Amino acid sequence: MLVANVNDYFSTEIFKGVSSSLRKKGYTAVMLDSNNDLKNELEMLLSISTQHIFGGIILQPLNTNLNLLEENLFNNISTVVVDREIENGLWSSVVTDNFYCL
């Protein structure tokens, strides 16, 4: 899981849930922190996409620019985007609705 900032409470809570769920399926979760730095994020995405050591990525991106993400995250790795909406993105996403009230 690549998060925007490991110091963000929401990011660590998402990771704890992801890690628990993956462990039950026999996977080990790893959290990578872009430290709110777009350059770090893009370098990590490119590295993840090309090393073939990860089974997938859960991404909480800083960047929501589809073209920039597509340049650095290849389609050969299963990807889920969390906490951000990326218009016309190719990946599954999980976002919260902070505006809708019942």
Image (spheres, grey):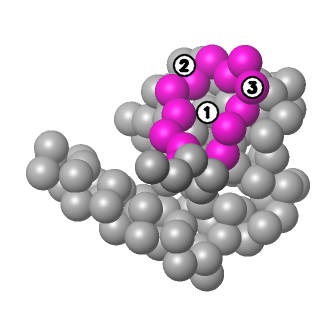
In this rendering, would 44 be left or right of 80?
right
Q: Quadrant of residue 98?
A: bottom right
| Label 3 close to label 2 by CB (< 8 Å) | no
Mark before the other along the chain sequence, 1 or 2: 1
Q: Nearer the viewer, residue 59 or 96?
A: 96
- Quickly name the residue at label 1: 49
Q: CA distance from mark 3 to mark 1?
A: 21 Å
> Does the magenta portion include 95?
yes
| Label 3 close to label 1 by CB (< 8 Å) | no
Q: Which mark is residue 76?
A: 2
Q: CA distance from mark 1 to mark 2?
A: 7 Å
At label 1, the amino acid type is Ser
Span highlighted in magenta in the image? 83-97
Where is residue 37? Give x, y as percent.
Answer: 83, 64
Where is residue 57? Give x, y as percent.
Answer: 49, 41
User: Dot 1: what SS?
Assistant: helix
